[in-house]
Image: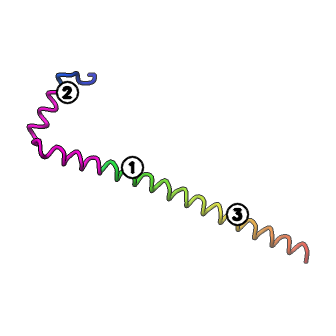
């Protein structure tokens, strides 16, 4: 089965209009668009949280490594 052709698409649109009515379709489309927007926003938010967490972890590792080096240097000098 392939993509629906011209007449099939027209038939599908007519059936949708008959089922939901002309006034309800814009509301449904608006709700669908808002849902997609919220989903994309949440995905981007999760990605940015992961990036921040990774940066924070690297900063902590760097600070711990520099503390260890300082301790080793102080021990050798003493």
Q: Which residue is mark 2?
A: 9
**Where are the magenta residues, as a range?**
9-34
Q: Nearer the viewer, mark 3 or mark 2?
A: 2
The answer to which quarter of the image holds residue 54 is: bottom right
Residue at the limit of the structure toward the bottom, as seen here? 78
The N terminus lies in quadrant: top left
* Mark-to-mark CA distance, 1 and 2: 28 Å
The picture places residue 7, in percent across and down from the top left corner, at 17, 22
Q: Which residue is mark 3?
A: 62
Which secondary structure lies at badge 2?
helix
Query: In the image, what residue occupies the spot 26% across and 47% down?
Result: 32
Q: Which residue is mark 1?
A: 40
Query: In the image, what residue occupies the spot 65% across and 63% down?
Result: 59
Name the N-terminal-most of marks 3 and 2. Answer: 2
Query: In the image, what residue occupies the spot 40% across and 55% down?
Result: 42
* Mark-to-mark CA distance, 3 and 2: 60 Å
Note whether 41 is above or below 56 in the view shown: above
């Amino acid at each position: 089965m392939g993509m629906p052709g011209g007449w099939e698409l027209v038939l599908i649109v007519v059936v949708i209009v008959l089922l939901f009515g002309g006034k309800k379709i814009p509301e449904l489309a608006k709700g669908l668009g808002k849902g997609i927007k919220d989903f994309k926003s949440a995905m981007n938010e999760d990605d940015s949280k992961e990036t921040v967490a990774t940066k924070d972890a690297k900063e902590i590792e760097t600070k711990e490594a520099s503390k260890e080096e300082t301790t080793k240097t102080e021990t050798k000098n003493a």
